[in-house]
Amino acid sequence: MKLLIIEDEVELSESIAVYLKNDNFICEQAFDYVEANQKLKSNEYDCVLLDITLPNGNGLTLLSELKDLDKANGVLIISAKNSLSDKVNGLNLGADDYLTKPFHLPELSARVAAIIRRKFFKGKDNILIKDDLTIDIQDKIVRGKTGIIDLTRKEFEMLVYFAVNKNKVVTKEAIVEHLWGEQVETTDNYNFIYTHIKNLRKKLLNGGCKDYLKAVHGMGYKFDLENIVH
């Protein structure tokens, strides 16, 4: 899952990014209001970690603008401010949770995971896609009819992304931007994702799952749960 960390304290931002990356989150960072606003307008994120006090602007204003964009981002406010009014204002503007500095990184990670579960998976730790496929986003375990399916980190991230967008066509560009983000330089050639998708599909089939992953010619891919032949 892809996160945007909006925090002007560079050392804290780096610490958060390193910790969450180890928890298999994809992290991008913004250090002031202008940079954060640009990233939010041009990219999609599963959850945004938002500091209230930012250079060149206010985090609550950014939160209001984010909601005006009508995106499905989860939002966790992280701030040194601990006043009730700040907390209430943030939640009223659409934030999903509020964490006061200083905090422990394991708690931050747990709260981000909880927001994502509520937003995209109806609060369940396990996401039962079909009777032959279960994705556990908490423990990062995938099971098919034959048992646990051994996926690489990138394959797991890709499967979760497809699950979030089930029955929708997603383009190669969207897959690359979401799963690799700033790690990939601008390019017109996305052929490297074919190997990841081919391996993921093969492992799911070998695990006893039906053929959910379909290529849509000229468009991209679809995790099709509606037109499966039993």
Image (cartoon, rainbow, N blue to C red):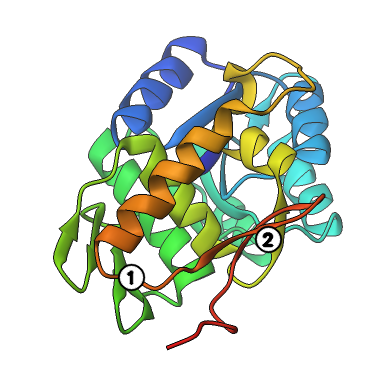
Indicate the position of residue 9 as horizontal and vertical percent values: 52, 15
Which of the two labelled residues, at mark 1 and mark 2, occupies the earlier sequence position? 2
Name the residue nearer the viewer: 201 or 93: 201
Mark 2 surroundings: few (<14), some (14-19) or many (≥20) residues within 10 A: some
Q: Would you identify the image quadrant in which residue 3 lies?
A: top right
- Mark 2 — residue? 72
Mark 1 surroundings: few (<14), some (14-19) or many (≥20) residues within 10 A: many
Q: Is residue 206 visible?
A: yes
- Mark 1 — residue? 209
Q: Would you identify the image quadrant in which residue 135 lies?
A: bottom left
Indicate the position of residue 164 as horizontal and vertical percent values: 54, 63
Q: Would you identify the image quadrant in which residue 145 lies?
A: bottom left
* Residue that extends furthest to the bottom in the rendered view of this protein: 230
Secondary structure state at the residue bearing disc 1: loop
Question: Of the residues shown, which amino acid type is indicated by label 1?
Answer: Cys
> Which residue lies at the image location 79% right of the left edge and 44% below the top edge?
61
Q: Is residue 100 visible?
A: no
Q: Is residue 59 above or below residue 111?
A: above
> Which residue lies at the image location 76% right of the left edge and 26% below the top edge?
33
Name the residue nearer the viewer: 218 or 176: 218
Name the residue nearer the viewer: 167 or 212: 212
- Left or right: residue 151 versus residue 167 is left
- Left or right: residue 31 versus residue 171 is left
- Left or right: residue 146 versus residue 52 is left
Question: Of the residues shown, which amino acid type is indicated by label 2?
Answer: Ala
The image quadrant where one finds the C terminus is: bottom left
